[in-house]
C-alpha cells in the first residue's frame, strides 16, 4: 500500500493500493504512513521525502467513504479524524522537506495531504485534476482542508472550490498557487528528484496571494466574503443542505480564531455532518453511482472507435461532443452538409471557450475537433459499428432514418435518443430488431451525468453492452431499464408535470408552484422546466403517455396540447409560461397571456405544503409502479435516474430512499388521502402497500 525506497539521500514514498484502480485514505493507509515517517525521521542519511503514486492516472481519490459507516457516534468519528489531521500536521512540520509529485486525480483527502506538503509538483496531463468535493457528500473537507486551502489560494477561491466541489485543472492550479510547478507526466520523477535536491539546501518559498485575495484573507474585508457566500448558499440551496454553511463556519473559525481552534472546529463539524440524514442520502447516491460503473455485460460489447451521430442539433451535437472528448471518431450527419457544419460550428465555439479558459490546450482543442466530421451523406456511415440518432420525435422519421442506416451498414447497432417513444415501436421498422436499443441522454449532454439505456425483449446483449461501454467511456452514470412508454425517467416526470398543470387549472399561481418545488429541493420549478424543455415536447410526451394513464383511470391534463396549438413553445420561441426579455441580465417574468388558458389572471392561494405533497407523491408513486412492473431492475437504478436525470432532490437520495426515510406507511397514507380527494392518479402502487405491511425498506443502508 505504502512503500519506501531510498535513492541516495531521497526517500520515495509510493502509494499503491493493491487490487484497486485508485488510492484511498483509510485506517491502514494512515497507520502505515505514520510508521514510514518515523523511519524517515530517524534515518539521518535521508534529507528529503517525495510522495508519489504508483497508479497510472490517480494520486489519491480521497477518503474511503465506506469506512464512515463503521463509526457509531460523531465523537468516535471525530477521534479517528484527529489521527488523520495529526498526521498531516506532522507532515507540515516535518524537519525534512516533503515534496508531492502528483499525476492524476488528487481529490478530497488527497488534496488535503498534498496541501500539507512543503512543495507540490503536478503534471499537465489531462488526467490530473484537483478538487475538494466533500460538499457533494454532505460533508466538508475534514483533514485540514478548510484551514489550509484559504491560506494557499485566498478565501474567495477556496470557498468557491469547497462550496461547488468543482474540478481545478493543472494550469488553473498553478495560476492560483495550489501547486508550485508543472511538468510533463514522463518528467515527473525527474522534476521531483531535482526539486528534492534543491530543497535539501534551501527552504521552499511560500507562494504569494493576489492582492485582493490577500486582503480578503487578512482583513475585515473577509467578513464581506463570508456574508456574500452565505447569501449565495441560502439562495441556491434554500437551506436544504447543512454542509455549505458549515464550510463557511469552519473557514471563518480558522481565520478569526487560533489555528488550533480552526482545526478543532473543522473536526467537530465534519463529524456532526457525517451523521446527518442529508449526508447519508448523498453517500447512498455515491455508492449507487459506484455500483453501476462496471458494465454487467462486459466482454459482450463490440469494439467501437467510430460512432455515427444522426442529427447535429442540441442533442446530436452534444452527443458528438462528449464522444469526441473521450476519443471516439464521429461522423456527424444532418439532412445536408450545411446543417451538419452548423452543428459542428456550435461544438467549435464551446471548444474555443475551453481553450480560452485554459481547461484544454490549443493542441487538445484542435485534436478534439479533428475527431468530428460533419457530413450530409450516409457514405460516412458505411460499415460503422453503431449509430446514435437524435432526430425529431416522430416515429415515421425514426423509421425512415433507420432504413437509411441499414442500407449502408446493415449490421450497425441503431441507438435511439428518444425520450418517450417505445423502442419496440422503433424496432418494428428494423430488419434486425436485436440491434435496436435506446440511449436516452439528457440536455445539455455535456453537463447532465445520466445515460438511460432502454432494452426491449429483442435487444441483444451485444447492443446493450456496447451502449453501456460507450456511456462509461463518455463519463456517464448508466442505468439500464426495460422498454415501455416513457421508459423510467420520462414516465415519472410526466405525472409530475401533469400535476403542475392541474394545479394551474385549479387556480394556483405559477410562481407559487415553482417556489414550492424549489423549496422542496428541485433545481428548477416544474413550470420553468416545461418552458425549458419546450411546450411542444410536453404536449408530445402527454400524447405518448396519455393512454397509459387513462388505462388506470387517471385523466391527464390537455393544457400542454392546447398551448402548443395556440403557438406557445416555451423558451425556444420566447412565448411560454414566462416572458423572456432580450438583453443580458434581463429577468424572466410571468407571461400574463398564459393565464387566459387557465381561467384568468385571478389566482387562488394553494399552500406550499399541498403543492409539494401532491407533486412529490405522484412522482413517487409512478416510480413505485415502474419497479412493480419491472421497468426498473432495482430501487438503486430508480434513485440514480430520478436524481441525475430529473433533479430529484439529492439530499433526499432519490424516490425510494425518500420513501424509506419518511416510512412506506406514511407515504401510503398520503396517497390514500389524495386518492380520495383527487381520484385514481393517486391510487397507491401495490408494491408500496406490501412494503408498508411488512415494514420493509427499498434501499439498504
Image (cartoon, helix red, strand yellow):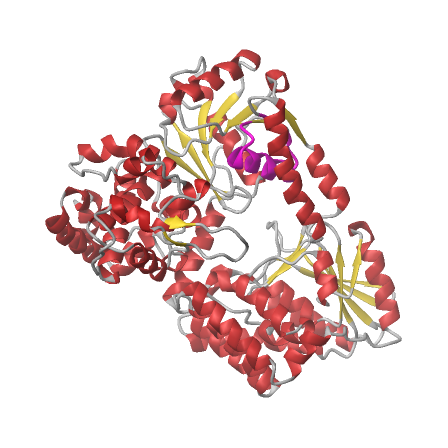
The C terminus, quarter of image: bottom left
Q: Magenta residues, as a range?
A: 310-333
Q: Position of residue 199 (x, y in %)?
A: 85, 72
Q: Say above or below: 123 vs 160.
A: above
- Residue 493 or residue 111, whichever sits in front: 493
Q: Say above or below: 330 vs 59.
A: above
Q: Position of residue 396 (x, y in %)?
A: 40, 19
The reply to whether residue 56 is visible in this rendering is no
Q: Position of residue 479 (x, y in %)?
A: 43, 40
Q: Is residue 261 left or right of residue 420?
A: right
Q: Say above or below: 155 vs 439.
A: below
Q: Is residue 563 magenta?
A: no
Which residue reaches farthest left?
Answer: 676
Q: Is residue 318 magenta?
A: yes
Q: Quadrant of residue 543?
A: top left
Q: Residue drawn at (57%, 40%), measured in percent from left and top? A: 474
Which residue reaches farthest bottom?
Answer: 258
Count of numbered circles on the image: 0
The N terminus, quarter of image: bottom right
Q: Say above or below: 659 vs 531.
A: below
Q: Is residue 83 left or right of residue 9?
A: left
Q: Residue drawn at (39%, 22%), measured in percent from left and top? A: 395
Q: Position of residue 633 (x, y in %)?
A: 35, 39
Q: Residue drawn at (61%, 49%), measured in percent from left and top? A: 21
Q: Is residue 605 left or right of residue 215?
A: left
Amino acid at each position: 500500500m505504502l512503500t519506501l525506497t531510498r535513492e541516495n539521500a531521497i526517500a520515495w514514498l509510493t502509494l499503491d493500493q493493491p487490487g484497486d484502480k485508485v488510492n484511498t485514505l483509510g485506517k491502514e493507509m494512515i497507520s502505515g504512513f505514520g510508521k514510514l515517517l518515523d523511519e524517515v525521521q530517524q534515518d539521518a542519511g535521508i534529507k528529503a521525502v517525495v510522495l508519489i503514486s504508483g497508479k497510472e492516472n490517480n494520486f489519491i481519490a480521497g477518503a474511503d467513504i465506506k469506512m464512515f459507516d463503521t463509526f457509531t457516534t460523531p465523537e468516535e468519528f471525530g477521534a479517528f479524524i484527529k489521527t488523520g489531521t495529526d498526521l498531516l500536521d506532522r507532515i507540515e512540520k516535518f524537519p525534512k522537506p516533503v515534496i508531492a509529485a502528483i499525476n492524476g486525480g488528487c481529490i478530497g483527502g488527497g488534496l488535503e495531504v498534498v496541501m500539507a506538503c512543503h512543495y507540490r509538483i503536478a503534471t499537465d496531463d489531462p488526467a490530473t485534476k484537483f478538487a475538494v468535493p466533500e460538499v457533494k457528500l454532505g460533508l466538508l473537507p475534514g483533514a485540514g482542508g478548510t484551514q489550509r486551502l484559504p491560506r494557499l489560494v485566498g478565501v474567495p477561491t477556496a470557498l468557491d472550490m469547497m462550496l461547488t466541489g468543482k474540478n481545478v485543472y493543472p494550469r488553473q492550479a498553478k495560476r492560483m498557487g495550489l501547486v508550485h510547478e508543472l511538468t510533463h507526466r514522463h518528467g515527473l520523477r525527474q522534476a521531483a528528484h531535482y526539486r528534492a535536491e534543491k530543497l535539501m539546501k534551501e527552504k521552499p518559498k511560500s507562494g504569494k496571494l493576489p492582492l485582493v485575495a490577500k486582503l480578503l484573507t487578512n482583513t475585515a474585508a473577509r467578513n464581506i466574503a463570508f456574508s456574500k457566500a452565505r447569501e449565495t448558499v441560502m439562495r441556491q440551496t434554500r437551506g436544504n443542505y447543512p454542509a455549505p454553511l458549515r464550510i463557511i463556519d469552519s473557514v471563518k473559525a480558522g481565520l478569526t480564531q487560533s489555528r488550533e481552534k480552526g482545526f478543532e472546529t473543522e473536526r467537530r463539524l465534519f463529524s456532526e455532518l457525517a451523521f446527518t440524514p442529508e449526508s447519508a442520502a448523498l453517500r447512498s447516491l455515491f455508492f449507487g453511482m459506484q455500483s453501476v460503473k462496471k458494465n454487467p455485460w462486459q466482454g459482450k460489447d463490440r469494439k467501437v472507435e467510430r460512432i455515427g451521430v444522426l442529427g447535429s442539433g442540441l442533442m446530436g451535437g452534444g452527443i458528438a461532443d462528449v464522444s469526441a472528448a473521450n476519443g471516439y471518431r464521429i461522423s456527424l450527419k444532418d439532412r445536408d452538409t450545411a446543417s451538419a457544419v452548423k452543428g459542428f460550428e456550435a461544438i467549435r465555439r464551446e471548444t474555443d471557450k475551453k481553450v480560452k479558459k485554459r481547461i484544454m490546450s490549443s493542441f487538445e482543442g484542435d485534436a478534439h475537433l479533428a475527431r468530428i466530421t460533419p457530413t450530409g451523406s450516409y457514405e460516412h456511415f458505411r460499415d460503422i459499428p453503431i449509430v446514435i440518432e437524435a432526430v425529431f420525435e416522430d416515429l415515421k422519421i425514426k423509421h425512415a432514418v433507420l432504413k437509411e442506416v441499414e442500407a449502408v451498414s446493415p449490421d450497425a447497432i441503431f441507438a435511439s435518443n428518444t425520450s418517450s417513444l417505445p423502442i419496440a415501436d422503433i424496432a418494428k421498422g428494423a430488419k434486425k430488431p436485436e440491434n435496436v436499443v435506446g440511449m436516452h441522454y439528457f440536455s445539455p449532454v455535456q453537463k447532465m451525468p445520466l445515460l438511460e439505456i432502454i432494452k426491449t425483449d429483442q435487444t441483444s446483449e451485444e447492443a446493450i453492452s456496447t451502449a453501456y461501454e460507450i456511456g462509461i467511456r463518455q463519463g456517464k452514470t448508466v442505468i439500464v431499464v426495460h422498454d415501455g412508454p416513457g421508459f423510467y425517467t420520462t414516465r415519472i416526470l410526466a405525472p409530475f408535470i401533469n400535476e403542475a398543470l392541474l394545479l394551474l387549472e385549479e387556480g394556483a399561481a405559477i410562481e407559487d408552484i415553482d417556489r414550492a418545488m424549489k423549496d422542496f429541493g428541485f433545481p428548477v420549478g416544474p413550470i420553468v422546466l416545461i418552458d425549458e424543455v419546450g411546450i411542444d415536447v410536453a404536449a408530445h410526451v402527454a400524447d405518448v403517455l396519455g393512454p397509459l394513464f387513462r388505462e388506470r383511470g387517471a385523466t391527464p391534463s390537455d393544457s400542454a396540447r392546447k398551448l402548443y396549438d395556440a403557438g406557445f413553445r416555451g423558451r425556444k420561441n420566447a412565448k411560454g409560461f414566462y416572458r423572456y426579455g432580450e438583453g443580458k441580465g434581463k429577468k424572466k417574468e410571468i407571461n400574463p397571456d398564459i393565464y387566459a388558458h387557465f381561467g384568468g389572471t385571478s389566482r387562488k392561494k394553494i399552500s406550499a405544503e399541498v403543492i409539494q405533497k401532491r407533486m412529490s407523491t405522484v412522482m413517487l408513486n409512478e416510480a413505485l409502479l415502474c419497479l412493480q412492473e419491472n421497468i426498473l431492475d432495482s430501487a438503486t437504478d430508480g434513485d440514480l435516474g430520478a436524481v441525475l436525470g430529473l433533479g430529484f432532490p439529492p439530499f433526499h437520495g432519490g424516490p425510494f430512499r425518500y420513501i424509506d426515510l419518511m416510512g412506506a406507511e406514511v407515504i401510503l397514507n398520503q396517497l390514500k388521502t389524495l386518492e380520495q380527494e383527487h381520484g385514481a392518479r393517486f391510487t397507491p402502487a401495490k408494491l408500496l402497500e406490501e412494503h408498508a405491511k411488512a415494514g420493509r425498506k427499498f434501499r439498504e443502508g
